[in-house]
Amino acid sequence: MNIEELRAHCLSMEGVTEKTPFGKFARRFDSVLVFYILDHMFCMTDIDDFTSVTVKAAPEVIEELRITRSSVSSHRNMSERHWIQLNLNGDVPDSEIYELIKRSYEIVKSKYTKKIKKQH
């Protein structure tokens, strides 16, 4: 997988936008590309150091991946319970990474669609 394949996959899902929002905190974060659904993050990667992808996942999925795969870790700035970093070119095949990105999108979309419906 390369950065353009990742972007194409994420942007193919309905309502997805992309931003580089963290540069305002420190210049070293200018290259962090974040994908959003309903203005909430579901996937991120560093476009200058494209070695991993971070996604939201169910806690039980995160636990299973940590037990069964060596190329997963916690992202240092995200909740360990809900986010996992998938190191590329490790023991998680690209097809599974794409599926985890899709599930992340669905988790976030479902959560915030329910909140929007409650407000109306």
Image (cartoon, rainbow, N blue to C red):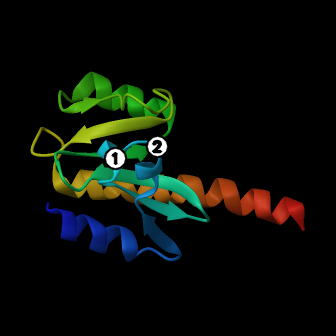
Residue at disc 1, secondary structure: helix
- What mark, if any, has residue 25 been given in the picture? 2
User: What secondary structure is marked by label 2?
Assistant: loop
Gap in angstroms between the C-alphas marked 1 and 2: 7 Å
Is residue 100 among what the camera can see?
no
Q: How many marks?
A: 2
Residue 77 position, x and y percent, is 43, 31
> Observer-nearest residue: 91 or 7?
7
Q: Position of residue 10 (x, y in %)?
A: 36, 68
> Label for residue 86?
none
Which residue appears at 21% of the width and 30% of the height? 69
User: Residue 46 location in percent, x, y?
Assistant: 26, 50
Q: Is residue 26 left or right of residue 52?
A: right
Query: Which residue appears at 14% of the width and 62% of the height?
Result: 2
* The N terminus, quarter of image: bottom left
Few, some or many residues within 10 Å of mark 2 (<14, 14–19, 20+): few
Q: The disc labelled 1 sits on which kind of residue?
A: Arg
Q: Quick one: 118 or 40, which is closer to the camera?
A: 40
What kind of residue is marked 2? Phe
Q: Which residue shows up at 61% across the image and 65% down it? A: 38
Q: What is the quadrant of the C terminus in the image? A: bottom right
> Which quadrant of the figure has residue 118?
bottom right
Q: Residue tagged by mark 1?
A: 27
As drawn, is 51 to the left or to the right of 43? left
Does 24 sit above or below residue 57?
A: below
Residue 100 drawn above or below residue 16: above
